Image: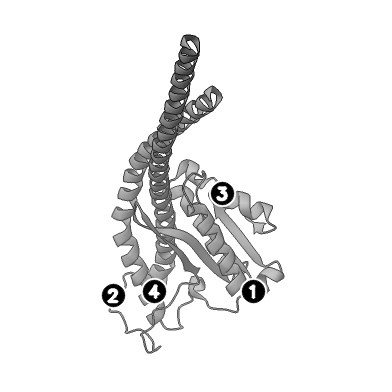
Amino acid sequence: MSGQLKEVRNRIKSIQSTQQITKAMKMVSAAKLRRAQDAILQMRPYAVKLQEMLQNIVSNTEGDIDMALAANRAVEKVLIVAITSDRGLCGAYNANIIKLAKQTVREKYAAQFAKGHVEVMPIGKKAYEHFSKNGYKVNDRFWDLFGDLTFEHVKEAAAVAMEGFVKGEYDAVEIIYSEFKNAATQRFKVEQFLPIAKVENTDGAKATKADYIFEPEKATLIAELMPKILNTQFFKAVLDAHASEHGARMTAMDKATDNAGELLRNLKIEYNRARQAAITTELTEIVSGAAALMG
């Protein structure tokens, strides 16, 4: 009986230590989440409007202007940008991104993958480790991007994708990431980065012509605007993923803390019952011994 009590006491101490760690990690993630959330919420309206403007320009510009980043061609070579976190302990966040990336390859680019024409650009250590170990062609230049998350570093990754598309190294570029909604909700997305998507009406007709005034001339302005807007879109996806990671981790640590509390309650009940049984047994033995001496 004493051995059982000691085992339960050790389990209680172990769970209490774990609960302290999960509480601390929840607080750290909450602090990081606030900064990451502010960053994406401040940037998103501008990024969304810029993307709408770019799609309208591409949809309504006639063929007299060469727009290499909007060129639609037969898809032979594909770049998949998979954005995960560097660390775990954030629930199924990383697993869902990796699962969606593999599902996209399987459903949309199976033929290209069979020919070895699908390349993965992992951003985040978890994506890099998974795709490197599972036979995927990996561009490993930017997997540690979250170590120094700035617009300049993200722009370098976007530039590789854009240059590769213009040179014909890729015919399509897809970004797979988690769109931040709130601390408890993330939406996992596959977003076409290149070629730039065109806007179509619901009936499939060409989009209504947007009324833009170009100054200087249209060709010069579009050549300058396209890379800058695409850099912004890429950065938005990374910021979305960054905020989603901290939200997922905070939620996971909150649930882990609650689960530890439930385990502690059950173990304390078990401990008290075992202790009560031990005391009852000892009292019974004492009373029986005393009765034997008196008899």
- Of labels 4 and 1, earlier in sequence is 4
**Looking at the picture, how far across and down is residue 24, in whole percent?**
39, 34
- Mark 3 to mark 1 CA distance (whole Å): 27 Å
User: Which of the colour schemes (rainbow, by chain, secondary structure, one colour) is used?
Assistant: one colour
Res 283 → quadrant: top left
Q: Which residue is mark 3?
A: 126
User: Which amino acid type is shown beneath numbered disc 3?
Assistant: Lys
10 Å crowding of disc 4: few (<14), some (14-19), many (20+): some
Q: Nearer the viewer, mark 4 or mark 2?
A: 4
Confirm or deny contact between disc 3 and disc 1 (CB under 8 A). no
- Of labels 3 and 1, earlier in sequence is 1
- Mark 3 to mark 2 CA distance (whole Å): 45 Å
Q: Residue at x 67, y 59 (%)?
A: 137
* Camera-side residue of 276 and 293: 293
Q: Which residue is mark 2?
A: 213
Q: Secondary structure at mark 4?
A: helix
Confirm or deny contact between disc 4 and disc 2 (CB under 8 A). no
Numbered circle sitting on residue 55: 4
Left or right side of 198 for 130? right
